[in-house]
Image (cartoon, rainbow, N blue to C red):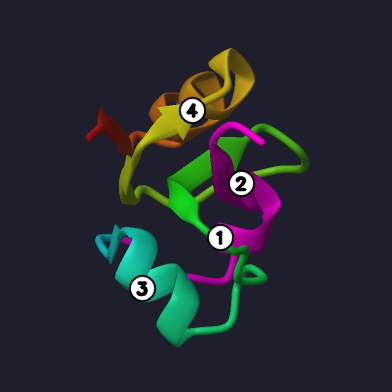
Amino acid sequence: VGKQYVIVNVEDLADVPAGTVVDYGFVMENGLAKAVKNDSGLKVLGGGELNVALTVKAAKFSASAKEAIEAAKGTAETL
């Protein structure tokens, strides 16, 4: 089947307090994404708006997600 990722859009992170480190564990603990079988980690997509500075750690980022995170003065770290 190939790799499956837990998907989250940047807009799903809009209510997270600034300065938070957002990673797979944070997303799952806070119910920000649905679990998938045999997942290969977190993938962040660029849907919506993000206006808070976050440190986001994920297996994959879309180009637009990375831009949105960095435009909000945050950091996108690929694991």
Query: Which of marks 3 and 2 precedes in the sequence?
Result: 2
Report the amino acid beneath label 2: Val
Disc 2 target residue? 10
Residue 15 image offset from top left, x and y in percent: 57, 71
Disc 1 target residue? 13
Local packing at callout 4 (Cα closer than 10 Å; few below 14, some 14-19, many 20+) is: many
Local packing at callout 2 (Cα closer than 10 Å; few below 14, some 14-19, many 20+) is: many
As for residue 26 lying within the magenta part, the answer is no
Report the amino acid beneath label 4: Phe
Q: Which mark is residue 25?
A: none
Query: Which of marks 1 and 3 precedes in the sequence?
Result: 1
Local packing at callout 3 (Cα closer than 10 Å; few below 14, some 14-19, many 20+) is: few
Q: Secondary structure at mark 4?
A: strand
Answer with the quarter of the image where residue 79 lies. top left
Separation (CA) of disc 4 from disc 2: 10 Å
Query: Which of marks 4 and 1 precedes in the sequence?
Result: 1
Q: Which mark is residue 61?
A: 4
Name the residue: 28% across, 65% down.
20
Local packing at callout 1 (Cα closer than 10 Å; few below 14, some 14-19, many 20+) is: many
Quick check: 52 above or below 25?
Answer: above
Separation (CA) of disc 2 from disc 3: 14 Å
Quick check: 67 above or below 30?
Answer: above
Separation (CA) of disc 3 from disc 1: 11 Å
Separation (CA) of disc 1 from disc 2: 5 Å
Q: Does residue 18 appear left or right of residue 13 in this picture?
A: left
Report the amino acid beneath label 3: Phe
Of marks 1 and 4, the one in the foreground = 4
Quick check: 57 above or below 65?
Answer: below
